[in-house]
Image (cartoon, rainbow, N blue to C red):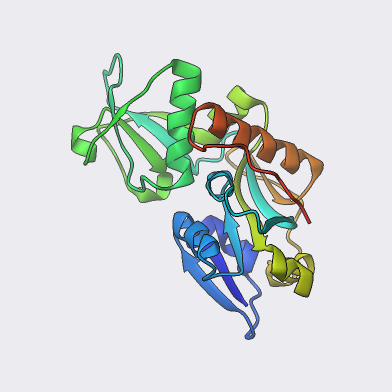
Amino acid sequence: MRIAVPSRPIFDRLVASTRGEHQIIRAPQAECEMLLRTARAELACISPLGIGTASALSDYRIVGTTCLVGEEHLALASVRFRAGLEIPQTYYAPEPQDFITTVGLLLLAEQHELVLEQVSSAALADTIIGWNDMGEFPEHPVVIDLTEEWWLAMECGLPLGVWVCRSELAEEHDVVALTRSIAAAQLPETEYTDSGGVLHWQWSDQVREALRTTVEMLYYHRFIEEIPALNVL
């Protein structure tokens, strides 16, 4: 089976115990979503944006199993502003297609009524949106932590990755058991981090509601064309 998972290290624990009969594809999350939509992967860990943009693909199921949802301050991703800035007008995203970029733009619109113009480099930008592992930006020292800002704005966690599979796979295989078997041993349901945040590693009603809220906000801000059905195994 071809299993696509984001290449960022925070997702490593979801595929820590891979077995030889499966092909694990590590790729940027936007590419994982494309691999699923084009049937080049049967199972993929994708974002709510990926679920929303795949809504035309009726043949998929969310797998209620291991996942990754962030709450409060995690120091994983940020919106950064140039020093001395009054009103930002432009932004640069190292990974413009990444879900985190969309989250940053959504929060700026929702919380601050800001719609920014994309530019081609950090040097030209008032604002930087991205994962914190994308580099240092000393000219943009004012930082909003994205998962904390999402928590304050939406009163729910931010789903960073959930497993989705093609429906025919769900009929042929126990994908819930499979995803659990390839995860790190003793993966907790909830993990409290040194930064003061919380990571949820297991599906729950709380995760379902966070996912529902997120896709509704993506639709409200026109990042997706329709609210997808959340068909959960």
Image spot of residue 119 (x, y percent): 23, 36
Name the residue nearer the viewer: 173 or 81.
173
Image quadrant where residue 57 sits:
bottom right
Q: How many marks?
A: 0
Query: 232 left or right of 106?
Result: right
Residue at the top extreme, as displayed:
86
Image quadrant where residue 166 sits:
bottom right
Q: Quadrant of the C terminus?
A: bottom right
Query: 119 left or right of 72?
Result: left
Image spot of residue 154 (x, y percent): 63, 26
Q: Is residue 99 visible?
A: yes
Q: Is residue 173 visible?
A: no
Residue at the left extreme, as displayed:
124
Q: Height in image: 78 above or below 47?
A: above
Q: Could you tell me which residue is drawn at 57 percent across and 63 percent down?
A: 12
Q: Quadrant of the N terminus?
A: bottom right
Image spot of residue 50 (x, y percent): 54, 49
Image spot of residue 18 (x, y percent): 64, 76
Name the residue nearer the viewer: 227 or 113.
227
Query: 22 left or right of 137?
Result: right
Name the residue nearer the viewer: 7 or 171.
171
Q: Could you tell me which residue is drawn at 50 percent across and 21 percent down?
A: 110
Q: Could you tell me which residue is drawn at 71 percent across and 45 percent down?
A: 230
Q: Height in image: 222 above or below 188?
A: above
Residue at the bottom extreme, as displayed:
20
